[in-house]
Image (cartoon, grey):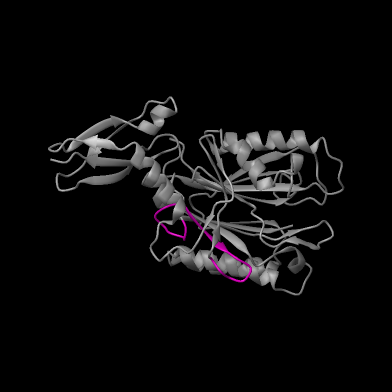
Amino acid sequence: MTLILTALSHNYIVQAADRRLTYPDGSLYDDDTNKAVFYCGRVAVAYTGLALMKEDQPTAEWIGMYMKDELGAESAMNRVAKETEDYLRTINRPDKRLAIVATGWATYKEIQPPLPFICVGSNFMADSWSWKSTADDMMTVRYQFLERDKLLAIFVAGQALTPDEQRGLERDLRQAINDGSSRAMVDLLSTTIQSVAGGKDSRAQRVGKGMIIHLLTKASIMSGRANMVVTPLTEDLPSFIYVSKEGKTSPFHGAVLACNGTLLTNVGGGTIPAGGKGVIRSEMEDSAKKYPMHLGVDQVQFAAQCSFCALEGKHNIVSGELPLSEKEAWINCRGELGHLLLLRRHKH
């Protein structure tokens, strides 16, 4: 069983999960299994427990498959829970525990500014948010929001932290938040996982040093650019970083990407230079170049239908202005899911 650490603050959300997969007896099966899903660039998801679902489908792909068609985190998690329940009733195993941990920003109109939340769908978590030793067939979905007067919330799933580890992590995270450092938050979660993996107690057998870490920022939500997912970590956009058990970040392996009816698996690539955008953002730009929005030579104001929304059968007008001195600009449609668009001025 893996170790998932999720830290919520009012500017940053960091989720880190190790990638080790073990047999029920604790022996190693694989040290580089993907256990993470990125839903529409807004919600990071990780799981602990059952690694394979119906017809031996990897659990991360199973989660993404049922999230991809839903329009919000709540409906997506409920759909995953329902489909998982149906499967759990068909299997008879001594240990069929599963916990799916989702985190992101609540952006309802009545919640302003956005609030960080954590959502857990599990068949072995009690109403008190404590873990039970036995599993049910029923998957229950629970939510918690970071209250506005609270600085920090930490959620631990899978392997437990010792009281001393938890207190030390909370103390250091509070300092990092007060310093306004998302990088320090990332480092604290990752070093905690690697410390457990390198320890001398029984947890080390279950937790690996390889990780995937997600960073979700309020800034990216407020700017309307939350649909883009990039690597390495950046505060401007939803981002992730892959760390191998040897401590390398290249070639990288991303989470399963699920959104707008699309499921991407085995996302990966080579070295990303400092300041690079990564292949995921590059692929989005390639798509945007196929359907650019055009502006007249002397026009400043523009208003046009988002071509990607139109392909989805939705009507969403994008408007704004482009200074005459600029030939093109990257913008977002700010629709329900958001799309990356290229605005291009006609040549003379």
Q: Is residue 117 visible?
A: no
> How far across and down, in percent of the image, does residue 218 sit?
43, 51
Residue 90 image offset from top left, x and y in percent? 82, 35
Asked if residue 150 is positioned above or below residue 166 in the image, the reply reads above
Residue 30 vs 77, above or below: the answer is below
Is 268 on the left-hand or right-hand side of 130? Answer: left
| Quadrant including the C terminus | top left
The image quarter containing residue 80 is top right
- Height in image: 201 above or below 94? below
Residue toward you, 30 or 219:
30
Most foreground residue, 265 or 127? 265
Vertical order, 174 against 119 (above or below): below
> Is 117 placed left or right of 159 in the picture?
left
Tell me the magenta residue range: 231-249
Going 66% across and 41% down the picture, which residue do you hit?
Answer: 62
- Where in the figure is residue 304, as x and y percent of width and height? 28, 30
Residue at 43% in and 24% down: 313
Q: Main secondary structure of the magenta part?
A: loop
Give left or right: position of 141 versus 272.
Answer: right
Give the image location of residue 326, x and y in percent: 19, 47
Can residue 247 be seen from the camera position used here?
A: yes
- Is 263 inside the magenta-drawn segment? no
Q: Residue at x 54, y 63 (%)?
A: 251
